[in-house]
Amino acid sequence: MDITDPDASISSAEPKPHRGLHQKVFVNRNLTLENIRCYGFDMDYTMAIYTSPDYESMGFEMIRDKMVSIGYPHEILRYTYDPSFPTRGLVIDTKYGNLLKVDSNGNILICSHGFRFLKGENIAYYYPNKFIQRDDTDRFYILNTLFNLSETYLYTCLVDFFTRCTRYTNQEKGYQHGDLFMSFRSMFQDVRDAMDFIHNTGALKDRTIKNLEKYVVKDPNLSVLLTRIKKVAKVFLATNSDYNYTEAIMKYLLETNVKSGSPKRLWHSYFDLVVVDTRKPLFFAEGTVLRQVDTNTGKLRIGTYTGDLQHGTVYSGGSSDIVCDLLHVKGKDILYVGDHIFGDILKSKKRQGWKTFLVVPELAKELQVWEERKNLFEELKLLDTFLAETYKHLDSGSKECPDISAIQTRIKVLTHRMDMAYGQMGSLLRSGARQTLFASQLVRYADLYSSTCINLLKYPLNYLFMAPPVLMPHESVSQPAAGLVSSELSEIVKITTS
Amino acid sequence: MDITDPDASISSAEPKPHRGLHQKVFVNRNLTLENIRCYGFDMDYTMAIYTSPDYESMGFEMIRDKMVSIGYPHEILRYTYDPSFPTRGLVIDTKYGNLLKVDSNGNILICSHGFRFLKGENIAYYYPNKFIQRDDTDRFYILNTLFNLSETYLYTCLVDFFTRCTRYTNQEKGYQHGDLFMSFRSMFQDVRDAMDFIHNTGALKDRTIKNLEKYVVKDPNLSVLLTRIKKVAKVFLATNSDYNYTEAIMKYLLETNVKSGSPKRLWHSYFDLVVVDTRKPLFFAEGTVLRQVDTNTGKLRIGTYTGDLQHGTVYSGGSSDIVCDLLHVKGKDILYVGDHIFGDILKSKKRQGWKTFLVVPELAKELQVWEERKNLFEELKLLDTFLAETYKHLDSGSKECPDISAIQTRIKVLTHRMDMAYGQMGSLLRSGARQTLFASQLVRYADLYSSTCINLLKYPLNYLFMAPPVLMPHESVSQPAAGLVSSELSEIVKITTS
Amino acid sequence: MDITDPDASISSAEPKPHRGLHQKVFVNRNLTLENIRCYGFDMDYTMAIYTSPDYESMGFEMIRDKMVSIGYPHEILRYTYDPSFPTRGLVIDTKYGNLLKVDSNGNILICSHGFRFLKGENIAYYYPNKFIQRDDTDRFYILNTLFNLSETYLYTCLVDFFTRCTRYTNQEKGYQHGDLFMSFRSMFQDVRDAMDFIHNTGALKDRTIKNLEKYVVKDPNLSVLLTRIKKVAKVFLATNSDYNYTEAIMKYLLETNVKSGSPKRLWHSYFDLVVVDTRKPLFFAEGTVLRQVDTNTGKLRIGTYTGDLQHGTVYSGGSSDIVCDLLHVKGKDILYVGDHIFGDILKSKKRQGWKTFLVVPELAKELQVWEERKNLFEELKLLDTFLAETYKHLDSGSKECPDISAIQTRIKVLTHRMDMAYGQMGSLLRSGARQTLFASQLVRYADLYSSTCINLLKYPLNYLFMAPPVLMPHESVSQPAAGLVSSELSEIVKITTS
Amino acid sequence: MDITDPDASISSAEPKPHRGLHQKVFVNRNLTLENIRCYGFDMDYTMAIYTSPDYESMGFEMIRDKMVSIGYPHEILRYTYDPSFPTRGLVIDTKYGNLLKVDSNGNILICSHGFRFLKGENIAYYYPNKFIQRDDTDRFYILNTLFNLSETYLYTCLVDFFTRCTRYTNQEKGYQHGDLFMSFRSMFQDVRDAMDFIHNTGALKDRTIKNLEKYVVKDPNLSVLLTRIKKVAKVFLATNSDYNYTEAIMKYLLETNVKSGSPKRLWHSYFDLVVVDTRKPLFFAEGTVLRQVDTNTGKLRIGTYTGDLQHGTVYSGGSSDIVCDLLHVKGKDILYVGDHIFGDILKSKKRQGWKTFLVVPELAKELQVWEERKNLFEELKLLDTFLAETYKHLDSGSKECPDISAIQTRIKVLTHRMDMAYGQMGSLLRSGARQTLFASQLVRYADLYSSTCINLLKYPLNYLFMAPPVLMPHESVSQPAAGLVSSELSEIVKITTS
């Protein structure tokens, strides 16, 4: 027995086959794991899960403090991060300072101005069609990643503060203070700049590295998973982070794990290929020059490595095409696991035809709420059936006009109640019966999704992930008669199970 | 009683409230008809349904003959239109001459070369990833409309002919014949040019107008529908056709309907606004100059009408914004009924936030097949359940490897059997359990859809269309316990039904 | 002696070596004819010079009549073409209906509204900076070709008519007439459409072909030129016209020329390659599919010819790259002779590095006026010197302020007098001391230019065209001392002349 | 007398009216200073002239050292900056590692690979047409500014080193060294990154500020010029530099100048408006948010100043439109003085119609060489005349073929001799008789140019700058007869001088 094999050594901790709801991997499109010849992993929020809400709090405080240091009023220092407010996937309207939750067509589901939620006619004042043209990326900014949560909340705090502060006069596009006008747009720009500042100067990374135990979740099963996968397929890591940060995080995740007495296994050795500084989504298009990283110094080698792939070599830059070349695999044979719906999943799928696995940490809570409040959703469905009954015998010539206002009110109440169970901005994925933009992108671009990539452990690596059948409205109208099992099927069942 | 009201005069023919499956309007997103202040209609394949397959046959023969007249071999005259082959929404790969059916991510579901269907490795020869980058519109051409069916089929005939004709040598990108090379790309261009020719010279329209009874389906309920709608909302017609053709078609549809003795009602009078030459999808963006049409001569007036909207006035050009201005309505108050998923539905929805109703004439057949073969789909679902059971007690550490090849073969057989029930290229909407690009666009962009707009007659004009709940994979895993009806709901039911 | 050689047979008509000013070819950049391995010719306004103003008059009348037929008032039929008004290269401002003459930076030199010329503050009303952003091609339309002259004039007539017609009220962006508003933009669109109509329906071409003697200038020297060139280099024809028109024109130019008794020489035989339907400027970029033309029927062969170049074969479509391949020449070895500053010259130069020869028929008149009125220009120069003297002893600290208003007035008078000598809109190339956009493009992109391509006859085909030295302002300040001839030069002179 | 007025106090140093060639301002297009209502100045290389070659040497050494620190061989430390090699306006071909000097059409005038100059067929190997498509900005990088000189030279050193170093194998697109391939492209990227590093980290600025006396030329006449201009027009400063650097430089230029006893005048007070962080060329398009700078701390105020313009207020960001608004001037009333042909001059001219003054420090040397070697240019002209004579009596039918090879050789010799007088890459503005891309842009976009903006001092502020007449080739053929002065002119002369 190879004692360096974590799979072997920690077998006592081996996860049980039975899969609870939280351990499940969900399926949007059928995927045969047996055909996957190569697994790719993003690092941040994929292999490295940051502790929530501690990590977001730290980010929030750093940009908040930066804002004050560039001249924002000291009063905003009083705000602290409230994890119950922001949801991923919201949209900032930089023109009017609103925070929007929208569906895939740009219809507005929820709209807040600071912490004030706008209703009906107030929304119509800003958006007569209750609709935004998402393509106008100059005006609308989508907060797609978990990293964005702290700035989502900070922007909300700023709008809250200035709206209520008597020194400032509220105007349509910002605030007036004496001779100074502060537009929602410039406030947004300041928040973005502060965010870039703490990322680019390495300030956020420095603090994270100094407090790894506090900010990064370590799961011993990660090394088990990587070890098992590497036995059947190639494995690579592709992260937008730089080498030094990647080194610190991966060391912590994979090397500080060993029992006393076990020989140390280097984190590089879990991968066939490690690529840092990938600049996704550019990585999935033309990419950048591929450089080798000197793992002793963390510096880039000048020139591009052209020899055969050497185990444990770390690269910087490159592109998804180069990865395929180096590993001798095709796009459809790759399962890429990442957390960024746009940069990791949409682009790898649309541009390269990769198979995709989206890590959605929020799913743990989403599932819990869904379980607890499913009765609300059931009631929504019943109301639907009831409405259908109400109109059943009417057509366009009928004079009769049923009063459905009570039902409609009830639908709104139920929707709000469901939303609130998730948090103030509601669920990541829906608002009542309507799915969010994020949900629709998840369904379109991610073949698989789960709250953590570790859940792959629960499935045999030749598993056939089957998507639940998605019926179109016309197909789901009449429920099928109890399916008579065909004789061929009976035969197959016999063969397979024997 | 106003005897010019067709609603009144043909009351004996009034449709029955009970809605059969084929008379249903299906719902992707909830929509309250009561809130709709304005209905817009496209003409071709929306109000004017062309007789299938007669109309496609005529188109096919005209472009086929045109091809011969520009030098294509006389042998192709032997081909006649076969309605069982083409499906709407297919994609021509102009590089390799293949006809593709793809899903929303560009994964290939079916691939034919002429009438030969390619399998596994043959598809992989052309498309190593079994995937196309749909964005490459230079190379891939999507046949989105029913008008495209004849050219879809003609292109297939050409590939079939040249592939089998011994005078030509098959090459990767076309055919060699002595010193001449005929690329798949140039053949595609020739078909497109021929198609444009019969449309732009008016040849197709002339023949249609001369044989209205043969080529255009007349439904007396159209006037009933328009009359009823006009009582509660504004109605406009927006068509890319020119005035003379519109006049001929609409006269036939709405004016040749009257009982002897009834006073004649002009077709214009059914609409608050008629706009021809709309140049959709440009119409939903910047549009063109709005001109008035002199309905006596069919010629455009020079200059733009700036007065109040006059009943029965016909315009040419303009834009969706102008229509909103003229009718004093907002985008969200408009329900637009059209047949073109891109030009009518996607653009009006994405750019303007209109409510949308997609007319899908194929739906009649789709529903019929679905009903007849639903057992195949049921069996597919059972196989899924069975597979899940097979793997239930396994995880990534398991050595056991169930043999599921029989199941997979069976899935392929069932999928193929379902596909063939629709036609040689399968269903418009799915291939086995996977939805087509067309289906995914229909679900995303059309709020409502039905096989004909006449089906609106079956619903009261204050109807609340409710979408069936769409569960995401993680939501649909565990079926809810039989919903206990909340006490509030019981109360509502009481109120509403009393 | 080969009696089919027109060079030989019409030797009596041989042009004399001495080159008058009107027979000169002018040089913007040095060009060694000896290095030219291939000559390309456009047809329209290059080999085929259309009789001016008869041809423009015909075009004017056809679009004028078309305008009336689509509803413009019959009064405009009274306008006839006035060749003294329009100049090539003007710009229509479709927003305000003005006709502009601009320099290469977009500064306005002349501005007319109908036939009224705007002055100072009136120009400033529309263009506060006396400047337009030429990049705004949605608003500004440049009338680059001689074909555009008739529409330039017609648009001016329309603005003149409606401005003065009492039935219409003048507004900033057009005219109001009762409920109708006619914008300058829509008038422009109507003129463009009418122009496209007479071109696309072949109406203009039909009339031209029926009156070749009247509308096309036949110069017997064309065949001499082509014959001589073909002895030393390859020759091709590349025209946007279709085959039938090209055939008619070239036959007339080259085949109807022979003395009785001479055997007939086909026009194709003057060229190594003939390409019609070139769709320049697209031809100089990606181009279109290359097809062979069946010269018996004028129809396109299906498929692309792939064999060796056959003499006299006619092609349709293609691209400049294909021409280079077929003729085995490189871009820098080609001298392309055309009349379209953008489509022929700028694009072939910028995209492909071809040598370029711009045919500028107006140059005959430009040269004549320049000769006659050079004294005006001399006086302008004197005024400059005089001004310089006036300020000679002043600097930024001087209190003295010379009164130069008389000089400035005089400069305006002289400029206007020069302009009027060319026509109402002035010269094609300059306005006083300032060059037009057209002139600056001519200087930048055309290596050679002349009033007709026939002038090439006057130069040996190994000629070294030398550009006159162009001094920058700082170089031309001090006139050089009478050049002492270096001893090397004396030596060279001796060798060369001996 | 106002003793704070430097114009008054340093009158003894007042420049003499007589203008030597080096003190002249040259004119491309007439410009009446009297009409200028507002003067704008860039700072770097415009008001602040950096000492050459000391400043370039410092930049060179900083990026060279940075290159070594990221892994480039220590041998390159041996290179030191050689001011005789690089010229501004060269183009790097990142594909082949060549340095190119091109004309405005992309024709190659000079090509070097490292320090080796390529000739004829070697150039043709890389560029078969001796021509580049400048639009391909992915491949070609234009070194437009004086800041680029050091990187131009460093890139040349790198190519020189690796080409000659035996450890590396030369390949078409770079160098191979064992398993490493170093492409010309990646070397270029490394140089660019190093350049950005020393600019963005402030390293270059820090050193400059610490050695102002060494690196920045202080001219006491600058304050005289600004004082005089401010009496007759508005003055603003618009620089891409940040506030702290601007403050340090401007203080040095304008505040350290005073005689003992004179009261100190703040540098802000010379301007009506100071704008830092302008991000030209973006500044001339949509620009960025305008912020106020707190001149005590150098930090930005949050929010935008909306009150009236206050004297001495410093702003950050904004746009040219905002500047016009704040100063109440129109684009055509502004003379903008800058050193960047693209960012300052082309954009302000093309986008905004501003009058432009290009500072070309190299002009001092260019003028000197031109004066000294004008005889070479004269000889080139004589050769031209002589060639014309040679061919005078020949035409396309002539059999005679003069031998002009001696002349052509002589032309090459003279061109090379002229080029070498300027430096190894020749003149900034020409190569023999041909103008560079830089020269053609200077002529097109700069109304005025001079070696320093201080030269404006030599002209009265109501001066009429007259451009020397630019004749087109056909206009310059025949020299005009000695101009008879018209009687009107005589009259004007009398009036003006009396």
Image (tube, coloured by chain):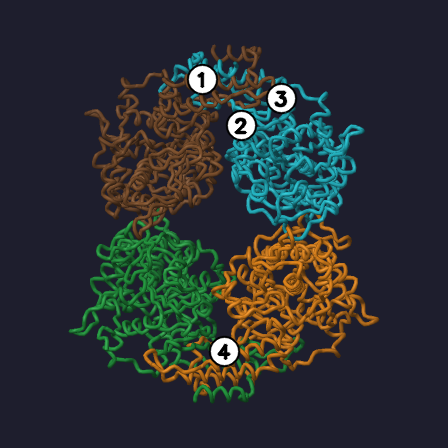
Chain colours: A green, B orange, C cyan, D brown
Foreground residue, C5 or B83? C5
Residue count near mark 4 (Cα–Cα under 10 Å), binned few <14, some 14–19, many ≥20:
some
Foreground residue, B297 or B83? B83
Q: Earlier in the sequence, mark 1 or mark 3?
A: 1
Q: Which mark is residue C32?
A: 2
Q: Nearer the viewer, mark 1 or mark 2?
A: 2
Amino acid type assigned to the residue bearing label 3 in the image: Ser
Both labels 1 and 3 in a single chain = yes
Residue reaching furthest to the right = B261
In the picture of the structure, the residue carrying the numbered disc 1 is: D379
Whether tag 2 and tag 4 are in contact, CB under 8 A, the answer is no
Quadrant that contains the C terminus of chain A: bottom left
Amino acid type assigned to the residue bearing label 2 in the image: Thr
Instruction: Give residue C2's quadrant in the image.
Output: top right
Q: Which mark is residue D398?
A: 3
* Dot 2: element: strand
Q: Nearer the viewer, mark 2 or mark 4?
A: 2
Distance between the alpha carbons at the discs numbered 1 and 3: 28 Å
**Residue at x 47%, y 89% (from the top left corner):** A494
Picture coordinates of residue D34 (x, y %)?
44, 25
Amino acid type assigned to the residue bearing label 4 in the image: Pro
Establish if A242 lies above or below A435.
above
Instruction: Give residue B341's quadrant in the image.
Output: bottom right
Residue count near mark 1 (Cα–Cα under 10 Å), binned few <14, some 14–19, many ≥20:
many
* Dot 3: element: loop
Q: Nearer the viewer, mark 4 or mark 1?
A: 1
Distance between the alpha carbons at the discs numbered 1 and 2: 20 Å
